[in-house]
């Protein structure tokens, strides 16, 4: 028996695999979000505008990350998902380190495109693996743990980015956060195996023939209204979420004259710790409430996003830093509330043979709208507000962005209403194929 087979046969293997998948996801978000901590020093050195920096952290990354995720996911639904995740991890870690050697804006943009290309191959196969390791009854909790990779990544990016950029500068920071991913890739490859597809389902699915085509998967997701509204809600959640995550460090440094390390400590506590608690609670809450009513798998997000907005508006209206941070505890808690329920919903609603592709389509919509246009719009509106608000133009831009969460909550509410239609649609797809 090989070393990997010995690990796979252990009773707690699925939790071990989930832990490593979460570590990989954490690595991706460290490398993705480190830009938020380094925007200000990069902007000063390269002489860029807020609009240009919004392009660097938004469309430059998101266009390739979201688009390439779909063809890679089609391969993942047909081949070894562990190998795909390992290769992706090597690419994005190496490209992150290369960001530190960029001599100008164009070279940095190309390196960030490389990071996006690498990260495109990780999340959809990871979602598919988790769905095969954990049944529907505990999938929300598992996805909640996996989604903590976002918060862990933010915590490391904020803390490491703040301290390292002050000590060594932004170039060395990129190198320092990129290299550990190569070690994780080796660890993951040699200790995690490829589970049987559909292994966690209560009624073992009969998997025959090739997986549905990309077009069939897209049409299925559009016909199932719960999936359609979940994707729309996730896109709007990402639109606001990425806008805040990538611009909050700059906002605190401009409006409160905080140093990079002070900014890192503050946001690590808020987004990393408080946000991490919220992310896990959302996944666990879904599993608990869904036992009473399946619609809570989506309604948990709707309620969380609606509660989020008034506190977010109040935060940006306050000048006193201590009171503002106290109020921000609520938005920090609910900021990632959509992650685990969304991941679990899509995997639960999708046919077993299309899970990776369904995840990639969801992430495509989320990231093109969210990461592609959220940070970009914040930068554009900030520049437009600059003549009227001066140094506080970014504050007003972020305030307007927060109101979009009401629209997001509406879509998740509708997703819950239509959740009962999904089983019939899935049965029809299986019969047709």
Image (cartoon, grey):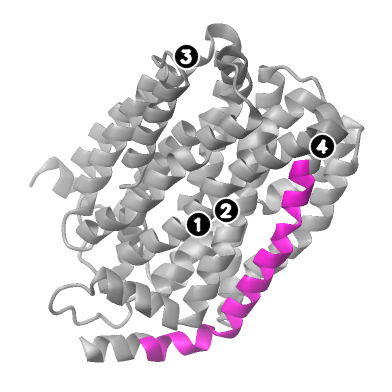
Q: In front: 217, or 326? A: 217
Residue 124 appears in view = yes
The earlier-in-sequence mark between 3 and 1 is 3
| Segment tinted magenta in the rendering | 397-425
Residue 256 position, x and y percent, is 82, 25
Which residue is disc 1 drawn over? 366
Gap between marks 3 and 2 measured at Cα: 28 Å
Q: Residue at x 63, y 66 (%)?
A: 301
Q: Which mark is residue 238?
A: 2
Residue 22 drawn above or below residue 36? below
* Residue holding disc 3: 171
- Residue 289, image x, y percentages: 61, 75
Local crowd size for mark 4, using a 10 Å CA cut-off: few (<14), some (14–19), many (≥20): some
367 shown above or below 29? below
Is residue 9 in sight in this rendering? Answer: no
The image shows residue 84, relative to residue 251, as above or below, that is below
In contact (CB < 8 Å): disc 3 and disc 2: no
Residue 214 lies, in percent from the top left, at 27, 69
Task: Determine which residue is flagged by label 4.
Answer: 325
């Amino acid at each position: 028996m090989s070393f990997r087979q010995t690990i796979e046969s252990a009773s707690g293997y699925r939790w071990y695999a989930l832990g490593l998948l979460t570590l990989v996801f954490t690595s991706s978000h460290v490398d993705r979000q480190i830009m938020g901590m380094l925007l200000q020093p990069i902007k000063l050195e390269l002489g860029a505008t807020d609009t240009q920096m919004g392009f660097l952290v938004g469309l430059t990354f998101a266009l390739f990350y979201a688009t390439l995720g779909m063809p890679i996911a089609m391969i993942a639904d047909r081949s070894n998902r562990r190998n795909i995740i390992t290769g992706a991890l090597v690419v994005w870690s190496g490209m992150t380190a290369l960001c530190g050697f960029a001599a100008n804006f164009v070279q940095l943009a190309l390196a960030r495109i490389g990071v996006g290309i690498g990260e495109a191959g990780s999340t959809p196969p990871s979602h598919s693996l988790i769905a095969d390791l954990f049944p529907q009854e505990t999938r929300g909790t598992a996805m909640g743990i996996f989604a903590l990779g976002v918060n862990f990544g933010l915590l490391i990016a904020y803390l490491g980015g703040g301290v390292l950029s002050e000590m060594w500068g932004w170039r060395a920071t990129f190198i320092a956060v990129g290299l550990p991913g190569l070690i994780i890739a080796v660890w993951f490859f040699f200790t995690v195996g490829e589970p049987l597809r559909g292994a966690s389902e209560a009624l073992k699915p009969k998997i025959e023939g090739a997986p549905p085509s990309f077009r069939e998967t897209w049409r299925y997701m559009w016909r199932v209204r719960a999936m359609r509204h979940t994707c729309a809600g996730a896109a709007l959640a990402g639109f606001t979420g990425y806008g805040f995550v990538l611009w909050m460090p700059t906002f605190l440094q401009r409006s409160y004259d905080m140093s990079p390390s002070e900014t890192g400590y503050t946001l690590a506590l808020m987004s990393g710790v408080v946000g991490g608690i919220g992310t896990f609670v959302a996944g666990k809450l879904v599993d608990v409430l869904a036992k009473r009513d399946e619609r809570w798998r989506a309604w948990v997000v709707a309620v969380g996003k609606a509660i989020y907005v008034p506190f977010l508006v109040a935060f940006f209206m306050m000048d006193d830093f201590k009171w503002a941070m106290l109020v921000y505890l609520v938005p920090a808690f609910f900021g990632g509330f959509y992650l685990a329920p969304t991941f679990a919903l899509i995997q639960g609603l999708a046919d077993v043979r299309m899970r990776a592709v369904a995840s990639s389509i969801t992430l495509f919509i989320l990231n093109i709208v969210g990461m592609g246009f959220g940070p970009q719009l914040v930068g554009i509106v900030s520049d437009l507000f600059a003549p009227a608000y001066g140094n506080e133009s970014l504050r007003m831009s972020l305030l307007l962005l927060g109101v979009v969460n009401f629209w997001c909550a509406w879509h998740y509410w509708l997703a819950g209403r239509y959740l009962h239609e999904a089983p019939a649609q899935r049965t029809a797809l299986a019969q047709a194929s």
